[in-house]
Image: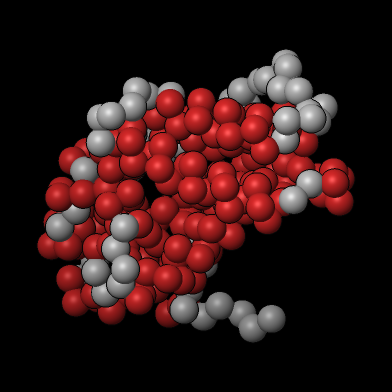
């Protein structure tokens, strides 16, 4: 593997500063608060440079979202699955994955808005989000994969997550409803596996409180989700 040059490392660091700034602005003010000039000001990266990295704020937000979901999967994998059955493990993993978003409704509103955009440049990051989401389910199913329709479960749960998240950020549903809907969906998809003894995995809070979403370990991995291209 070729070594990363100083220029490449600097580029990765700039991209990460841009992502942190965009997500921070979204967490404070929602989708409309993410203005590219404000991102440039907060990150210390020139506006023209930001547009070379990310063609629009939707692309920028989805790039940040992709990193967040990837980090969540890594953290869940490090923690290890919780539950005796595939149903329990998937239910617990899904609930843990969405728990951190309950305290950031404005950020999730911004991300859901960006998810609805059909810009071609969004596809890379939407695919990365889906890949990490699927990975969380695959990791939770574990050795029971031969007896479970993982692809089917992933498709259904991704639809449930998107719909429930949209309902929540629009004010139709209450905080905590996304995890509840996901648990209910898992119980219907895997009815032969009782969801008794559910436990909520307590994932670590982000270490970088200034941004409120990104951890120090994510900062060390500036190349995730296509950011090193």
Residue farthest toward the bottom in the current orientation of the protein? 2
Query: Residue sitting at 73 percent across and 41 percent down?
Result: 140
Residue 120 location, quadrant: bottom left
Where is residue 192 drawn, in percent x and y?
A: 79, 30
Q: Where is residue 127 in the image (x, y as percent from the top left)?
A: 51, 65
As drawn, is 154 to the left or to the right of 53? right
Horizontal arrangement in the rendering, residue 27 relative to residue 135 (left or right): left
User: Which residue ends up furthest to the top in the rendered image?
Assistant: 197
Can residue 227 be seen in this snapshot? no
Q: Which residue is drawn at 78% across and 28% down?
A: 193
Q: Residue at x 69, y 81 (%)?
A: 1
Q: Is there any visible trace of residue 156 in the rendered image?
A: yes
In the rendering, at what x and y percent does residue 76 appear? 65, 40
User: Quick check: 90 left or right of 29?
Assistant: right
Find residue 174 and report its image quarter. Answer: top left
- Answer left or right for 212 relative to 199: left
Residue 174 position (above or below residue 7): above
């Amino acid at each position: 593997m070729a070594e990363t040059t100083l220029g490449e490392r600097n580029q990765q660091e700039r991209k990460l500063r841009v992502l942190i700034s965009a997500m921070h602005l979204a967490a404070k003010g929602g989708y409309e608060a993410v203005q590219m000039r404000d991102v440039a000001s907060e990150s210390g990266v020139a506006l023209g440079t930001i547009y070379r990295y990310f063609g629009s704020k939707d692309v920028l937000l989805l790039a940040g979202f992709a990193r967040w979901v990837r980090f969540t999967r890594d953290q869940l994998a490090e923690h290890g699955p919780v539950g005796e059955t595939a149903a329990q493990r998937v239910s617990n993993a899904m609930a843990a994955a969405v728990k951190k978003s309950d305290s950031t409704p404005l950020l999730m509103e911004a991300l859901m808005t960006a998810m609805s955009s059909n810009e071609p440049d969004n596809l890379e990051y939407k695919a990365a989000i889906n890949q990490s989401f699927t990975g969380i389910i695959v990791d939770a199913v574990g050795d029971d994969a031969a007896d479970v329709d993982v692809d089917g479960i992933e498709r259904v749960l991704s639809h449930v997550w998107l719909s429930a998240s949209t309902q929540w950020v629009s004010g139709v549903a209450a905080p905590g409803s996304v995890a509840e809907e996901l648990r209910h969906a898992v119980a219907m998809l895997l009815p032969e596996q009782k969801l008794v003894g559910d436990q909520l995995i307590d994932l670590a809070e982000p270490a970088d409180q200034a941004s409120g979403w990104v951890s120090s370990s994510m900062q060390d991995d500036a190349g995730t989700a296509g950011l090193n291209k």
